[in-house]
Image (tube, helix red, strand yellow):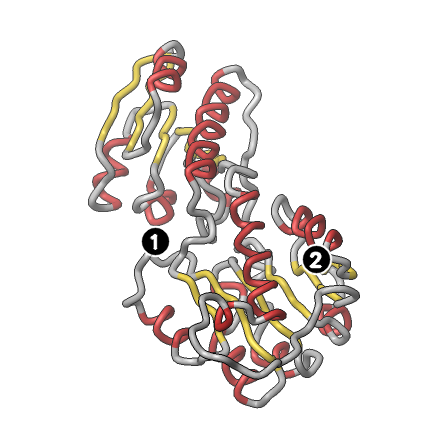
Amino acid sequence: MKKIVIAGANLIDSQKARLEALGEVTYLPSPSSAEELVSAANGADVLFSDGAFLLDSLPRLKDVFVTYPYVELGVFDSEELKTNGVVVANAQGGNRPSIIEWVMFMVLALFRNFSPMVRAKENFPVELQQSLVDKKVLIVGKGSIGSMIATPCEAFGMQVDFFERGDDLSAKAKDADLIINSLNCNSTSKNLLDEQFFMGVKPGAYYITFSRPYTYSLEGLIKAIEAGIVAGAGIDCDPEKFGDTTNEFYQKALSNKKILVTPHIAFSTKQAVAAGAEIAVQNIEAFVAGKPQNVLTKR
């Protein structure tokens, strides 16, 4: 029987019963430090974390299968962890529909500028906006979410292209009317969309991202907007805390009126939270059965 530690993750009764059928389960509150999480995981076969202090704790864990109920955790070396007997699995796909909904809201908000006209109280002159039909969109990253963003874009009549590892990013982006950043955090994606990239895109292009700023330069984006090259952007501030509008990154994005910024809410649906927990439970069941799934490979 396996020793399973649940650190802060919220589960429904049926999920608890499934895990308790696999072994000895200990339920702990969300840790207040990396030291507390490492101590809690000591001697466990499985650690189900809510994500609090998990990234900082990974190098200090030993001989444990780790899972958590969302997708992006940050940058770590999975090969190095493996030498310590640590394997990490995420909840791939759990937040995908919710993220895509947020992306399409931002697409429409940028191209059609609906917001000022909703519940308008004063007359205003006609100002024609841009339809999505025939607009060229480049999706940077063709993973679980990026690959599926293409479907609603194509339904709106957009022409979709992807950037994948090994492609010439600047060449791919030069004719794009919209660039959607769907990159994961790894050694090859660090600051991939830098100031030089933004300065070289098609004048009037829009930029949307739910990915972490590890993959792009906010300063470079703002400079390109101020230079009149990028027309505007939509940003969700991952990994800042949900709803936190006081952090430096959010405030910097907010300082430019052409950036539509949200405080890490792209994932925030009841369905995404429930799906993430369920996938993490399934990850544990698969691990105990000797068939681990959703295992992350990062360097």
Q: In the rendered image, which quarter is residue 169 located in?
A: bottom right
So how many labels did they put on this image? 2
Amino acid type, residue under disc 2 in the picture: Arg
Circle 2: is it few (<14), some (14-19), or many (20+) Cα within 10 Å?
few
Q: Earlier in the sequence, mark 2 or mark 1?
A: 2
Please indicate whether residue 160 sits to the left or right of residue 30 in the image.
right
Q: Tell me the number on the disc at residue 208.
A: none
Residue, disc 2: 165
Does 291 sit above or below residue 189?
above
**Quarter of the image where the N terminus is located:** top left
Residue, disc 1: 242
Residue 293 lies, in percent from the top left, at 56, 28
* 128 or 49: nearer the viewer: 128
Amino acid type, residue under disc 1 in the picture: Phe
Please indicate whether residue 295 sits to the left or right of residue 138 in the image.
left
Label 2 to label 1: alpha-carbon separation: 30 Å
Give me the residue at 75% from left, 63% from top.
Answer: 167
* 27 or 160: nearer the viewer: 160
Residue 82 lies, in percent from the top left, at 49, 37
